[in-house]
Image (tube, rainbow, N blue to C red):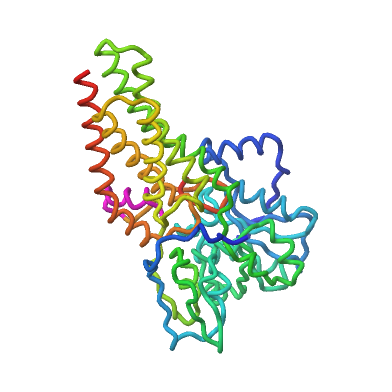
Amino acid sequence: MIEPVLTAPPPTGWDALRGVLSRWGLGRNRYRVKPGLYGLGSPGPDAPVLVTANYKLSFDAVRRAMAGRDLWLLVLDTVGINVWCAAGKGTFGTDELVIRVRSVGLGDKVRHRVLILPQLGAVGVAGFEVAKRTGFKVVYGPVRVEALPAFLDRGMKALPEMRRVAFPLSERLMLAPLEFLQALRYFAVFLGLAAVWTLGRGGSASDLASAAWPLLGSVVAGTVVVPGLLPWVPFRSFALKGWLVGLAWAGFVCWAKPAGLRMAGGQLLLLPAVSAFLALNFTGASTFTSQNGVNREIGLFARPMAASALAGAVLLILHGVRR
Amino acid sequence: MSLGPGLRYLPAVASLKLDIEACTGCGTCVEVCPHAVFDISDRKASIKDLDACMECGACSRNCPARALAVSAGVGCAQAIFNSMLTGGPPDCGCGSDQGSSCCS
């Protein structure tokens, strides 16, 4: 039973909005296209075959970059996850590609025997194995879909730069707000506890605010400042980068609002540790950290960070109690 | 666009190994590596920039001669913390963004 060729309506303004929302983690699970074979333009038996994920942002990015060309687009079922992440999980993988090539009857749709995959799909797909099992040769295209037209026009030869993953400021700043929002969940818990503590002891809202803004600053340091200034903050370790920026912030807090030694000690111990932890979490969003590297960082810094945060919190609570 | 000098991760941790005897010099590793770790000369691959390796595993998976080995995984602290809590393999439950990064 060969599946029919699918068509998708052109992206609309509503799609653009949903794309933004899905990047922010809203409605992401429903932002999918049906897996299968799509025709872009009016592809014939000699049209190239591109392979992508069934995350709608990925699908639309290919359509946008390839507008005006006649191609086949083979969409794998990656449960709505982008190519790189899905390849890491194995859903954008050898088995899924082989099954999909067969189920859409690709061998009868095209005369050639070439599949063009995004380079980052190589994390999950073994090209030589796909060739062995389907007769289709896998060619890895560029990392970024924007370079795909040039890649095709050059006879499927990539320039070295097309093969490199970058991590420009624009991309880091797009990820920063999301990191910040995720960290805010923890901050909200702190704020709730602090509100009960402060107001329960007859404090005012401004007492609460003065307890909260230093910590909020250390969240910004770890989730926005470190990602933004990533290449320029000293140290290669993300935890140390976060610690350093957090320390600068804690120094500023102590200078701006001097409140005794115990308070200063508490801020200097707690705030940098919070920033360090959040910056360490940004390894997951970065495009160049390795698992063994992150393991090394955790082994070196997790305990000192936790101890510092705990000691700082104790000092700050003592400061609050004695007041 | 390349990463640039400021964006380098910890040195001397990557687990990537090349079996030079097994290598046939086909160049697939050069093609799939997103950080230009490999070079080909005299019909053999070489690791010219080990510290740039992010252990994504694309090279070893696509090496027809099985000359490459790497403990592939995600360089994601949250994933590793998750696995410490659950005892399972590191998994960050990722899936957002514009396809060039993970875990957010």
* Relative side of A147 to A98, left or right: right
Residue A43 lies within the magenta run: no
* Relative side of A309 to A44, left or right: left
* Relative side of B56 to A307, left or right: right
Q: Tag count in the figure?
A: 0
- Counting from the top left corner in percent of width and height, residue A135 is at 60, 75
- Counting from the top left corner in percent of width and height, residue A182 is at 43, 36
In the image, residue A94 sits, relative to residue A210, either above or below, namely below
Give the residue drawn at x 29%, y 31%.
A264
Region rendered in magenta: B76-88
Front residue of B96 and A168? A168
Give the residue drawn at x 27%, y 28%.
A263
- Counting from the top left corner in percent of width and height, residue B61 is at 47, 71
Quadrant in which the N terminus of chain A is drawn? bottom right
Residue A278 image-quadrant placement = top left
Quadrant in which the C terminus of chain A is drawn? top left
Residue A18 image-quadrant placement = top right
Q: Which residue appears farthest toward the top when viewing the image?
A: A202
In the image, residue A119 sits, relative to residue A185, either above or below, namely below
Front residue of A255 and A181? A255
Front residue of A46 and A280? A280
* Relative side of A242 to A154, left or right: left
- Counting from the top left corner in percent of width and height, residue A294 is at 36, 56
Tell me the chief SS of the magenta region: helix
Front residue of A35 and B4? B4
Give the residue drawn at x 27%, y 26%.
A260
